[in-house]
Every structure is written in C-alpha cells, then in structure tokens.
Amino acid sequence: MRHRLKTNLILAAATVLSLTIAFPPIDLSPSAYVCLVPWLVLIRREKQRTVLWASWLIGLLFFFINVSWLRYVTYPAWFALALYLSLFFPVFGVTTRFMVRRSCLPLTVAAPVAWVGQEYLRSFMLTGFPWFFLGHTQYRNLIAIQLADLTGVYGISFILVTVNACIADVLVLAERRRNRARIASLIAWTALLLVLSTGYGIFRLAQDSPRSGPRVCVVQGNIPQSLKMRVDLESFRKTLRAYRDISLQAEGQEMDLVVWPETMVPGFFNLAEILDRVREGDFAAIARESLETMQLLSRRLGAPLLVGGETYEKRGGEFVSYNSAFYFDARHFEKEGRFAGRYDKIHLVPFGEYVPLKRPLPFLKGVLSRLAGYIPDFTAGEEAKVFDVKGCKFGVLICYEDTIAPLVRRFRYRNGARAADFLLNISNDGWFCGSAEVDQHLAICVFRAVENHVGIARSVNTGISGFIAPNGRIEAVVTKDGKRKQVTGALVRAIKIDRRLTFYTVYGELFAWICLGAWVGIIGYCALSQRRRRLNEFGGP
C-alpha cells in the first residue's frame, strides 16, 4: 500500500514538474509532448478514488506554482484562483478514466477530447481564465501553431494530448504481447495526426504574403505600479512626462501611429464633458496637462496617438468610469474640440476592475479594499470599436482582452465581413513586477494573431512590447541591454497586414464545441450502458 502511494505521488510530482517547465518562462516546449504521460498512466491503472485525489493534487500544485505572480497583487487571490482552477483537473481525470473503463476507447481517443473540453470550460466559466492551455507551450513553434487558424489553440492542445495519451497507452498495453496490433493502430493514428498538422503548418507558412501596413511606434515606459497607485499631482506628472520623453526619442522616424499602454495617461480625458464635476483640483489640472501633452506629441511626431486612460461620465443618472483607449489627433482636436474616437474596455477582470455582486453583497467592496488596498469600480463597455489610420482599420484590446479569443474575433470579423485589419494590445502588466506573467501574456497573444491571421502591436508598460506577425512570429520587441522586461524604450515598425479571413475567424470555437459535445456524449453513453447492464443483471425492465 505504501509503495503504491509513493509511486502515485512520484507520478503526480513528475507531471507537475514537466508540465510547469513546458510553459514560460522556462519555455521547454518539447516537454509538452510527454508531460501528461505519468498522470495518464495513473488514470489508466488506478481506482477512481485515487485518480480523483491525485488529479486534484496535480492541479493544485501546478496552478499554485504557475499563478504565483498574483502574490504581487494579493495573496488571497493567488490561493483562491489556484484552488478554483485545480478543480478542472480531477474532472478531466475522473471522466477520462470513466470513458476508458466503460467503453472500448483507448486513452489516445478519450483523453484529447476530455482535455479540450475542460480547457474550453475554463475559457468562459466565471468570466473565464484562458491561461495555461497546453497548446500555449508551442507559441514559438510556427509550424505547429498554424493549425490554430482552423481550430483555435484547442487544436494544438488536442495534438499534444494525443501524443501523451498514445505513449501512456503503449506503456500500459505493452505489458501484454497480444496487444501489438492495437498498439500499432494507436501509433499509426497519432503519427497521422502529427503528419497532417505538420503538413498543414508548412503549407500555411508557404502561403504567407502579408503586406506592410502603417508604421506604428509602441512605447514602453516601465512605470512602477507603486508610482501608478499614487493619486497626487506630482506622481501623475512623473508618469506623463516619462512617456512623453520616451516618445520624443522616436522623433525623426517615419511613423503613422504612436501607442501608449493601458491607463498611462492620467486625468479624465473627457474633461469638457464633466467640467461641472471637476472644475479645479489635481484631476482637472492633470487632465489639462495631458491634453496639452497629446497635442504637442501629435504635432512634433506628425502622427495620431492611441493612448490608455480613464473616462468619467454620467450614465443612467449616475457617474461611472471606464478603462478606455483614446484615439487622439491634434488636427481633429483643434477642429472638433474632442478626441477622434474612444473605446471602452468590454471584458473587465473580476475583482481587478470591478466587484461582482457588489449590489446584493455591498460588503465585498470593503473586503477587497482591505485585501488589495483599492476598490476597482470600472463599468464595461459595449461596442468593439475600430479606428482608421492610413486607410487601414484597427481595433484595441485592453489588458487581458487579448486572452479572450471570441472577443478578438469580434474586432476582426462582424456582419459577415472583415472589420479590423490589425490589432493593438495595450496593457499595464506592472502589477506583476516582471514575473512569468509577462511572458505568459505574450505567448497567449501569439495565438490571437495566428487564429485570425492578424498582425498585432503590443504596448505594455513594463514589457513585453513589440510586434507579432499574422503567422504568429514575434518579429521584434522593445529591448535594452538585452532585457525586454522592466526596461524603457520605443520601437517603430510597419505592422503586417493580412486581409484573408480564416476558418476560425468565421466559425469560432467550432472544434472546441465538437470536443465538448463528444466528451459529454461519450460520458452519457457510458453511463446509460452501465445502467442498462445493471438493470439486466437484476432483472429490471
């Protein structure tokens, strides 16, 4: 008994270790092809109760280690998120064991379907946390990830789990010689999937012919979050002037658009609309200074600006605030007296940007204030706006909106036609002090580019800022002395434009839906078959 427990603990630890090193920042992507093997062998051999606790333990340890960057914001959020995410792993483990035991399906067929099903559920349940999908480990493998333009990131996860499951099946079945034919068929099926996906990747890369679009300048100011959290005039000015000075370093270069990260412009930009509310004081002063700075930069650099800031306006009889992106052009402002356009963030981060259930449970705001030191109170926007620069349409993804695949599709495709030609991601990852979160965020953004064949420029306060081509290649990033995180700099580059619409862009998570349906259907079939057998055994109808 002790020997078996020790073996299972070793298998669980091996899974956690190999799965962790496959993700950024270690980035040992080949590990993703074998990381689940110990766990799948355990699922294949052990009883349901053992699979349940072992799978939960794997999930708890993995997420506790890999979302540890949340400790820079609040320890309770770190513990709570790790605990919540860990629950999906026993669901995968127990249902996979059930499907294999109650049907003739091998792990090679059952496990990939179940894995994609639980990844898809994680992507939207409780507003979703679409991080740490197995496919994300391959973000540097351009050939492998081209499949995402058909299936989304889920297709890459499916291939990886199939390889893991095939190895586990072979290890278990090889104990009996009469299983040779079955082993050969499983290896042949896995090899076929690998050949087809690799061939598709090579074919897609050979088709690449994007054109050069507008020249975009992404600015990375590396403002510490401790400074960003201060609400005094001098702190506001330090942030504003730092970004102004870095932007001016690019003066003289040809550019069509300058991009600043999320909330880097202090004060309320729609000052004229709420002047009766803030006629004087620090907020009014810094808002005016921000407007003057934008006008100065737009004139000197000869380009409009896309900058992150906050909006404060009256809506439904009360004042609300938005996490916004402002499109600023000095000529338009002088003519119209207002910004050329504004996008309000649609997908807000629960507890980070708003308090869920704050009206029925008003005490949550006080609790959050004590835990995190602030009260998030943004209102969600509604429209996925696109803007125009040099004849090209572009959309803006604020913060983690680039991790929400269906939202990215809304910017790229609507009403049966292409909407945005390229995308911008503006974010403030300064909360996480240059931790692994920054690398993981970049890896996820790569898949939004591939899924929709859309070029993406990223302007991130503490990094990683840069350019991603429509095929997912990270073309350039802001660096200084060999570092790309927690450094300052500005980078100008022509963004790549690919006007082709992909299967994924048009049909979305169809592959994930098929896997989820197959997962539920197989479980239902096995449950009904088991019930029918029991009724027959006891002479039931």
Image (cartoon, helix red, strand yellow):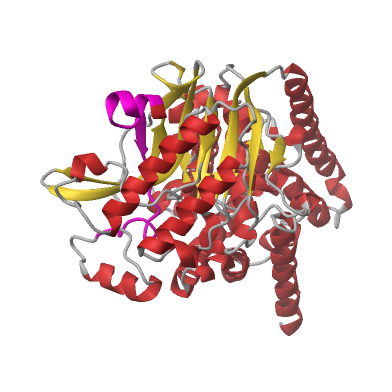
- Work out whether 486 lies above or below 8: above
Residue 15 image position (x, y, % from top left): 71, 63
Q: Is residue 513 visible?
A: yes
The quadrant holding residue 452 is top right
Q: Is residue 472 left or right of residue 243?
A: right
- Work out whether 509 lies above or below 360: above
Look at 38% across and 49% down and name the residue there.
348
The quadrant holding residue 369 is bottom left
**Residue at the far bottom in the pictured view:** 2
**Residue at the far left in the pictured view:** 317
**Residue 503 lies in magenta, yes or no?**
no
Look at 38% across and 41% down and name the residue there.
292
Secondary structure predominantly adopted by residues drawn in magenta: loop
Look at 13% across and 43% down and name the residue there.
316
Residue 332 image position (x, y, % from top left): 36, 25
Q: Is residue 282 left or right of residue 110?
A: left
Q: Is residue 468 left or right of residue 533?
A: right
Q: Is residue 106 visible?
A: no
Along the viewing direction, whichever of 492 and 484 lies nearer the viewer: 492
Along the viewing direction, whichever of 131 and 459 lies nearer the viewer: 459
Q: How many labels sit on residues?
A: 0
Residue 388 image position (x, y, % from top left): 45, 22
Along the viewing direction, whichever of 199 and 202 lies nearer the viewer: 202
Residue extent of the magenta highlight? 331-357
Residue 529 image position (x, y, % from top left): 50, 46
Look at 53% across and 55% down and name the residue there.
429
